[in-house]
Image (cartoon, rainbow, N blue to C red):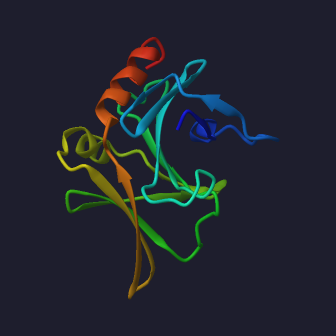
Amino acid sequence: MKSISTMAYLLLAVPCFAAEPTYSALAEYGDWSVFTDGDVCWIETLSAWHSSEDSALRLTVTFYDDVYDGALAVFNPRGFSEARLFALVVEGGAFPLDREAVYPDYLFNNTSGLMSALRVTEVEMVELKVVEQVSTVTGYEFSLNGYLNATKMAREECEGSI
């Protein structure tokens, strides 16, 4: 994950970009990379067991302004179906994710409950559950290896803005 293209600015509700910028990781901790751009810092990991970096779902936590706990987003390069429900599962607790109408390829959850659960959990993986129909559930796993150290560095890098 030395260099990952990302749209972290979407978390800030910037209207749109003509081309997706590419950022180089400032540091790596386990499966998480740390990025900065001006007053915005974010950490990111790819879904486990993906066939290529281009097809992987990305779990991103962005720190900016007064968002000390971070704003979580999941990006799917292939987009998300309109008829699905989404939740991030941490130690059996399900945290719903909302689709942002302006950015249909992203799912968001800005609750402090989810961010607190990610900070204190001792599990190594979290799972994104995608419910297509009552009987069809797809799961995507994300590693938490390095999450806490990456979060600490991102907060330190953007200390003046958060």
**Where is residue 73 shown, x and y percent of the image?**
49, 48
The residue closer to the viewer here, 55 or 80, is 55
Q: Is residue 141 above or below residue 146?
A: below
Horizontally, residue 17 falls left or right of residue 83, namely right
The answer to which quarter of the image holds residue 45 is top left
What is the x, y in percent for residue 29?
37, 30
> What is the quadrant of residue 139 in the picture?
bottom left
Is 134 drawn above or below residue 60 in the view shown?
A: below
Residue at image location 35% in from the left, 49% down from the top: 143
The residue most toward the front is 51
> Which residue is at a point 62% across and 35% down the rendered structure image?
9
Q: As drawn, which residue projects farthest toward the top?
A: 160
Query: Residue at coordinates 52% horizontally, 22% vertically from top-left?
Result: 26
Q: Is residue 128 above or below residue 81?
A: above
Of all residues, the one furthest to the right in this rendering is 18
What residue is rendered at 46% in x and 11% in y?
160
Q: Quadrant of the C terminus?
A: top left
Farthest-out residue, bottom: 135
